[in-house]
Image: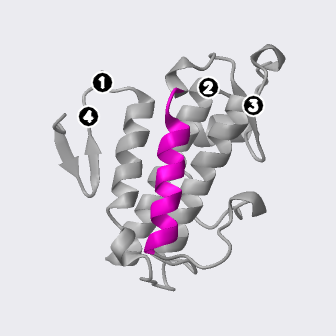
Amino acid sequence: KNPDFKLGFFYFYDIKTSIMQNLYLLVNQLESNISQFETTNNSVSGGSVGWHIEHSLKTIDQIITACKNSNPLNYQWQFNFKRFLIMSIAKKIPRGKARAPKIVRPEGEINQKTLTVSFSKVKENMKNWESLDKNTHFPHPFFGILNKKETENFLVLHTKHHLMIINDILA
């Protein structure tokens, strides 16, 4: 499918594109930066392009796995002001305000091979997402329990956040 228009490095697609289709496109944009995995710019971030790619992939993978392992019958929506503010009003994650949880922080060597393996793992894990129950959920450390739709929105928002950082590192 061809994008309707391009703004900066983000492609915007027509309204018929699902949130998860947008996430697939964002993952492909992350993948297009593999060759620059070693690039750093300390005035933008302490992490390299590879660190931001790996962190984004670990986040997607861990969250999808948590959702797949959740019991939809246990989901109960609760208002969360931080979630409302960031995901509904700002629609942007502010930089430098939170530290990534240890479970999604990259450890060990990051190179083209490790990133390629991570991309394969994430793409495999993303399969069958659409078939999951709408009350599939996971506990976010700041935003509380996110159901399937909220999770989709968070994953897109989070991935865009790190793509913007990568774009600034490469600028």
Residue 90 vs 168, above or below: the answer is above
The crowd level at tag 4 (other Cα within 10 Å; few <14, some 14-19, many 20+) is some
Q: Callout 2: 10 Å neighbours few (<14), some, many (20+)?
A: many
The answer to which image quadrant residue 109 occupies is: bottom right
**What's the CA distance linking mark 3 and mark 1?**
30 Å
Q: Amino acid at mark 4?
A: Tyr
Q: Which residues are magenta?
A: 112-128
Answer few, some or many: residues within 10 Å of disc 1's Cα (few below 14, many 20 plus, some between 14 and 19). few
**Mark sitting on residue 59:** none
Structural distance between the alpha carbons of marks 1 and 2: 19 Å
Q: Are marks 3 and 1 in contact (CB under 8 Å)?
A: no
Viewer-side label of 1, 2: 2
Residue at 55%, 72% in the rendered image = 51
Which quarter of the figure has residue 63?
A: top right
Q: Earlier in the sequence, mark 4 or mark 3?
A: 4
Q: Amino acid at mark 2?
A: Lys
Q: Where's residue 121, x and y in %?
A: 54, 50
The residue beneath circle 2 is 148
Q: Position of residue 34 (x, y in %)?
A: 38, 69
Percent across and percent down for residue 100 are 70, 61
Q: Secondary structure at mark 4?
A: loop
Residue 136: which quarter of the image? top right
